[in-house]
Amino acid sequence: MPAIRTVAVFCGSRPGRSPLWRAAATALGEGLGRAGLHLVFGGGRIGLMGAVADAALAAGGRVTGVIPDFLQQWEVAHQGVSELIVTDSMHSRKRRMFELSDAFVSFPGGLGTFDETFEILTWKQLRLHDKPVLICDIDGSAAALCGLIEGAIADGFAPPEAGGFFETVASVPALLARLAELGTVPGGAAALL
Ligand code: AMP
């Protein structure tokens, strides 16, 4: 398993109803920044995305936003990041985030977060990569998403091994500990940009 230097976080462009989710997003950004890990995210400064990025930057971390041109206005591009990569489409955004990252974290979010999480899991099912995918279930936030996957396995539409394409962690400290166990190396992935 290659060393983890760069971590992509998929999360909501809205804050969600529970203050627990914003607090967790802040703890995640802070934890990644303190661990010297390079954060790759969707490039907006709103919702949980903005909270993760702000906290990582405040902790001295390197933060790369990847945003499609047409969403720059909508998602209010974060101008304080270390690098902002502007892509010409959603597809090139997701591909760029994939290429840059050694591991993926799925955090509370909406349809876009589901899409990003499922795409990275689908690519794993197709053996296009074997990078770790950690789903963070903060206060039940991932129950529906995990239930959908379990249901597809139970119904015979996904292979039983699909349950092993991701790990679920119940808190930010557990997530950071698992990343460390998987083999994090501080310093970011400067050579990739
Ligand atoms: P959301 O979870 O819906 O707040 O979206 C989180 C992130 O996913 C945002 O950066 C969105 O730009 C992105 N996103 C939203 N819709 C889609 C989509 N259809 N495909 C891929 N990403 C999306």
Image (tube, rainbow, N blue to C red):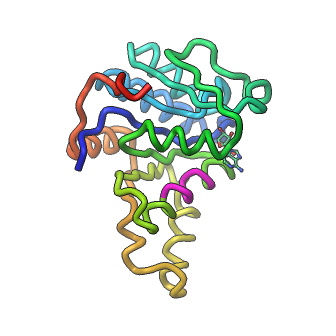
In the drawing, does residue 66 fall left or right of residue 88? left
In the drawing, does residue 193 fall left or right of residue 174? right
Magenta region includes residue 116: yes
Q: Quadrant of residue 72?
A: top right
Residue 190: where, in percent of width, then height?
Answer: 36, 22
Residue 106: where, in percent of width, then height?
Answer: 49, 48
Q: Is 170 placed above or below 74 here?
A: below
- Between 26 and 160, the one lying in front of the other is 160
Split into 4 quadrants, where in the image is the C terminus? top left
Residue 83: where, in percent of width, then height?
Answer: 52, 18
Magenta region includes residue 62: no
Residue at coordinates 51% horizontally, 64% vertically from top-left?
122
Residue 32: where, in percent of width, then height?
Answer: 37, 28
In the drawing, does residue 191 fall left or right of residue 50? left
Q: Is 35 placed above or below 126 here?
A: above
Q: Which secondary structure type mostly characterizes the magenta part of the structure?
A: helix
- Between 96 and 155, the one lying in front of the other is 96
In the drawing, does residue 186 fall left or right of residue 126? left
Magenta stretch in the rendered image:
115-120
Q: Is 161 placed above or below 118 here?
A: below
- Between 96 and 164, the one lying in front of the other is 96
- Which quarter holds ligand 1? top right
- Between 32 and 193, the one lying in front of the other is 193
Residue at coordinates 61% horizontally, 48% vertically from top-left?
113
